[in-house]
Amino acid sequence: MKIPQVPTVPLTYTATDVKRYDGELWRILKTAGPHALRWDQLRHWGPHGGMRFEPHPAGAPKVHPEAAVLYAASDFYTAFAEVFADGHTIDRDAQSPALVCWAPSRPLRLLDLTIRSITRIFGAAAIQMVEDRPGTHAWARALYQQHDDDIDGIYSRSSVDNGYVVTLFPRSKRIPSFPAAPEEHQLLNSAAADIYVDEAAERLGYAVA
């Protein structure tokens, strides 16, 4: 069944499509450079052509005051897999990347795309089946615009290592879900990050630079 690149009807979901997530979240972010972010900051610049679920308005990327996104994973292996998928090399220095781990201070309400039902293929679950980035951007944008009052983001499988990815939208900040401080916050070029870098590189088959 062909999935339209742009939603043609309002996105719908049921209570069983929503996952209440309160587990660990892992993120690798740039702490230097033009797009440096704080550990709990969503990215307002977008849409980013290389990312999957961008809620920003279509067009050339720029800063949008309302729309924003944050990509995290349920384990650090998937965080490394996603961020360093291009080239399969973990760069510990460029733009001072940091590995962060935290647990949400309240359960997140996430549209669960891991339990897709073919009977609801043109509902919100269809997002997972759209292949190209403009298409996933359009579906994510529709989800954000239509359900920002109820949904914190998306729970999906990584296209790199099949781990779990959590994509957060502005509701996750507007209705506070971030703790005062993370459980882990290590620059990748620090000795404290060695164990994470080494284990991720071995498991994923990535090189380390």
Image: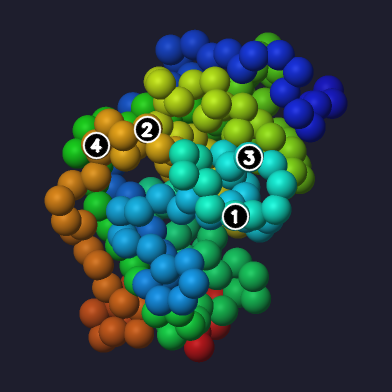
Query: Which label lies toward us, 3 or 4?
Result: 3
Q: Indicate which disc, 3 or 1, sits on the residue closer to the N terminus.
A: 3
| Element assignment for label 4 | loop
| Residue picked out by circle 4 | 176
Mark 2 residue type: Arg
Q: Nearer the viewer, residue 52 or 192?
A: 52
| Residue picked out by circle 1 | 62
| Element assignment for label 1 | strand
Q: Indicate which disc, 1 or 2, sits on the residue closer to the N terminus.
A: 1
Q: Is residue 6 visible?
A: yes
Q: Badge 1: few (under 14), some or many (20 or more) residues near its Cα, within 10 Å?
A: few
Give how far apart the Cα atoms at labels 4 and 2 are.
Answer: 8 Å
Looking at the rendered image, the quarter that the N terminus falls into is top right
Query: Which label lies toward us, 1 or 2?
Result: 1
Q: Is there CB contact under 8 Å for labels 3 and 1? A: no
Give how far apart the Cα atoms at labels 1 and 4 are.
Answer: 25 Å
| Element assignment for label 2 | helix
Give how far apart the Cα atoms at labels 2 and 3 are.
Answer: 17 Å
User: In percent of the image, x 48 and y 83: which residue is there?
Assistant: 94
User: In percent of the image, x 61 and y 17: which residue is there?
Assistant: 11
User: In percent of the image, x 60 and y 22: which residue is there?
Assistant: 124
Q: Indicate the quadrant where residue 54 lies.
A: top right
| Residue picked out by circle 2 | 171
Q: Nearer the viewer, residue 8 or 159?
A: 8
Q: Indicate the quadrant where residue 106 lies.
A: top left
